[in-house]
Structure formats: structure tokens, C-alpha cells
Image: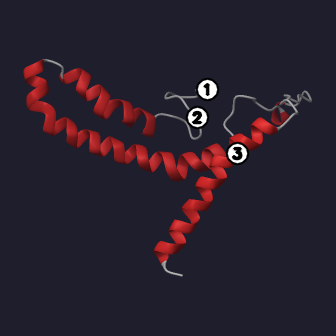
Amino acid sequence: MSLFRTWVTTMTFLIALVGLAPAQAASSSVDEVSYNSGNPSYTTDANAPKGYAMIGDLLIARPLLIAATAIGAGAFVVSLPFTLLGGNVGEAGQALVVEPGKAAFVRCLGCTRSGYGKTE
């Protein structure tokens, strides 16, 4: 199998795996319970990202967000003359570069919100 076919097969499998995970979680009838034995090393955090969310974030979301940051930076440079005339350079920079950059580089692995330690 060629390298390209192997990559496509792997990505298809991972996308299907990440896509099926919420359906499996929704069909579960058992509520998640935080088991606390008194030992801090065995305490579970219900808000911590799951493993499949971390894998999907690492393999799919982060590369796409880094690409969006690079494309947004290019679009910002191209639109700079127009945003200077319109007086909204800060807003354009925030929307095209800063927001995708924060999502790519500041967000914890598997988290859904930007910032350190935010899991919601």
C-alpha cells in the first residue's frame, strides 16, 4: 500500500472513531460517577477531556487550526490596506490571526475552550 493510501485509511478510521464516540456516550444509560477512594491519585475529574478527544484534537483539529492561523495571517496582510482605511485593523487581526492562534496553541489538548486548564 502506498504511503498516501495508508494515510487516508488511517485518517478515515480516526474520523469514524471520533465521530462514533459521542453516539456511544449518548446511548449509555449509566451516568458518570466520580469515584473517590480518598487517595488523590485515584480521584477522577469528570470535566477532564477523554482520550479520544485528545487524539482527535492532536491529529485533526490542531493541524487544521495551525493552517487556519497561517491562512488568516496571509489574509490579514492582504486585507491590511483596506482595514487601515476602514479603521478596523485590530478587529481584523483578532478575528483572522489571534483567535485561531489561541485555539491552536493556548488550548489544552482535548479541551473545547481556549485558555490554560479550561475543559468546558
In this picture, residue 37 sits left or right of residue 5: right
Determine the secondary structure under disc 2: loop
Q: Position of residue 11 (x, y in %)?
A: 55, 61
Q: Give residue 75's quadrant in the image.
A: top left
Number of numbered callouts drawn:
3
As measured in the structure, the alpha-carbon distance from the residue carrying label 2 to the one carrying label 3 is 16 Å
**Position of residue 9 in the picture relative to residue 91 (left or right):** right
Image disc number at residue 87:
none
Residue that sits furthest to the top in the current view: 87
Residue that carries the numbered disc 1 in the rendered image: 120
Q: Which residue is mark 2?
A: 111
Mark nearer the N terminus (2 vs 1): 2
- Disc 1 crowd, CA 10 A, few/some/many (<14, 14-19, 20+): few
In the image shown, does 110 or 26 lie closer to the viewer?
A: 26
Give residue 18's position: percent from left, percent from top: 63, 49
Residue furthest bottom as drawn: 1
Mark 3 residue crowding within 10 angstroms, few (<14) / some (14–19) / many (20+): few
Q: Is residue 4 above or below residue 11?
A: below
37, above or below 11, in the image: above
Disc 3 + disc 1, Cβ < 8 Å: no
